[in-house]
Image: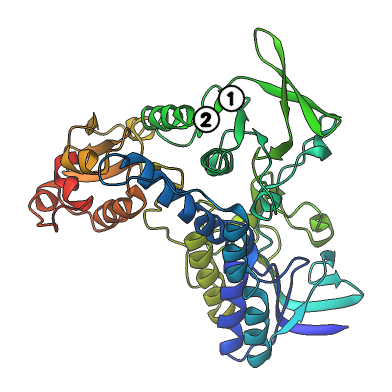
Amino acid sequence: MKEYDVFIIGSGMSGMTIANKCASKGLTVGITDELPYGGTCALRGCDPKKVILGATEVREFAKRLKSSGIDTIPKVNWKDIMSFKQSFVKAMPPKIEKGYEKKGIDTFHHTAKFLTENTLRVGNDEIKANKIVIAAGAKPRVLEFEGGHFAKSSTDFLNLEELPKSLLFIGGGYIAFEFAQIAARCGAEVTIVHRGRNPLKNFDQDIVTHLVSATKKLGIKIFLKTEVEAIEKIGNKYRVKGKSEEKTEYFEAETVFNSAGRPPAIFDLDLEKANIAYSKNGVSVNEYLQSTSNQNIYAAGDAADSEGLPLTPVAVLEGHTVASNIIKGNSKEISYPPMPTVVFTLPTMASVGYNESKAKELNRNIQVNYKEALDWFNAKRLKVEEYAFKTVIDEDTQTILGAQLIGPHTEETINLFAMAIHTKMKVNDLKKMIFSYPTMASDIPHML
């Protein structure tokens, strides 16, 4: 049996943070991941997605400025995109493992299963640890209907050697809209089928309406209130059966992708053997991110049922909190600053703080500013067709409660709103700020 002070399940950003911080304080540390080291964001999510998006951003910008200084719209070379993306991805796992080796952290490459409250089976090894951290991240939801196994994952999309001529995405969240737009801009025929009434349900629906409009303008077909019931392989295509309130419909595509959500990857760990309480949202944790039922266990990132959003910077924050509590004893309660989140479509859609519906639940006096800004200079110079904002202000304190944006570079502008909310900056002070002009940030005072 191998023994450690700390053993971590998962090599994503929260697990990496905990491993490095604990090792730096002299604790013996082991870590395992059945997948290459680096986690979803670096290898199968945010980072490779953003690299791929870059090429389509160039094409989109050129398309908008056609006849306004641009004569030729560039074509996207999918193979070159994949090669460029892979240059980032392939370098990450060996770099991470080399860093662990230098710090004396033992690495494993197997699934983990609990045996008792503080022991694990990792491959052929039995591991005992004073503290075990579950930082296993999330994985695609299992599609239980007939033929569900035919649907590929978001990881498969990011590793496509060739882009299919037609694609169908099951689900109406981040992954569906981001990848659907990428594929459509690269020339594919794309369909989104979502069972809910509204896509991207956690965002302000007035702003989502603009994203749906922009997505449809790309030729992407969107079917809402339609439950996928089966996938059938017919020749070199797939036929997808969807049922709405009115009728049963059939869709055909070369490739079908499962973008129906990503639950925490904890349900194969035999948590019951370690007396670990959990829900569909992850391991049940207290304010120290410690298991509510087993004091030897901590959880962080997507594996924890915490108030943190499933975002990489949040996973890092939770990792630092867990490491601190393991090293010093439970002395650091998790505290979340405003958490900006972005849908990396074109245009980007961004949100931070309370949206209008959530703000109304606070029973405060609120002011809501919602407007399309297509007549503003920034929209005109960039020739965009979607630019809108909604800001929510506490009238009594004159501070910002939330902001929802759609338009060019909102992924950057939203960070300024996050800082304003976090520092409780007064609206009038923000209005008096001098921003460099003409920039997207210079529009902020007019959004208040």
| Kind of residue sitting beneath label 2 | Pro
Residue 198: % across, % down: 51, 25
| Vertical side of 258 occupied by 265: above or below | below
Residue 43: % across, % down: 63, 64
| Kind of residue sitting beneath label 1 | Gly
Residue 265: % across, % down: 72, 54
Can the viewer see residue 405?
A: no
Give the image's coloring scheme. rainbow
The quarter of the rendered structure image containing the N terminus is bottom right
The reply, left or right, for residue 387 in relation to residue 290 is left
| Vertical side of 338 occupied by 324: above or below | below
Q: Residues within 10 Å of mark 2 (few under 14, many from 20)?
A: many
Residue shown at 74% from the left, 69% from the top: 33
Residue shown at 37% from the left, 58% from the top: 337
Contact between marks 1 and 2 (CB within 8 A): the answer is yes
The quarter of the rendered structure image containing the C terminus is top left
Mark 2 element type: loop
> CA separation, marks 1 and 2?
7 Å
Q: Nearer the viewer, residue 382 or 210?
A: 382
The reply, left or right, for residue 421 in relation to residue 87 is left
Residue 126: % across, % down: 88, 76
Residue at the limit of the structure toward the top, as seen here: 246
Give the quadrant of residue 289: bottom right
- Location of mark 2 (residue): 199
Can the viewer see residue 388?
A: yes
Residue shown at 50% from the left, 51% from the top: 309
Residue shown at 71% from the left, 63% from the top: 294
Give the quadrant of residue 406: top left
- Location of mark 1 (residue): 196
| Vertical side of 8 occupied by 158: above or below | above
Q: Nearer the viewer, residue 137 or 444?
A: 444
Mark 1 element type: loop
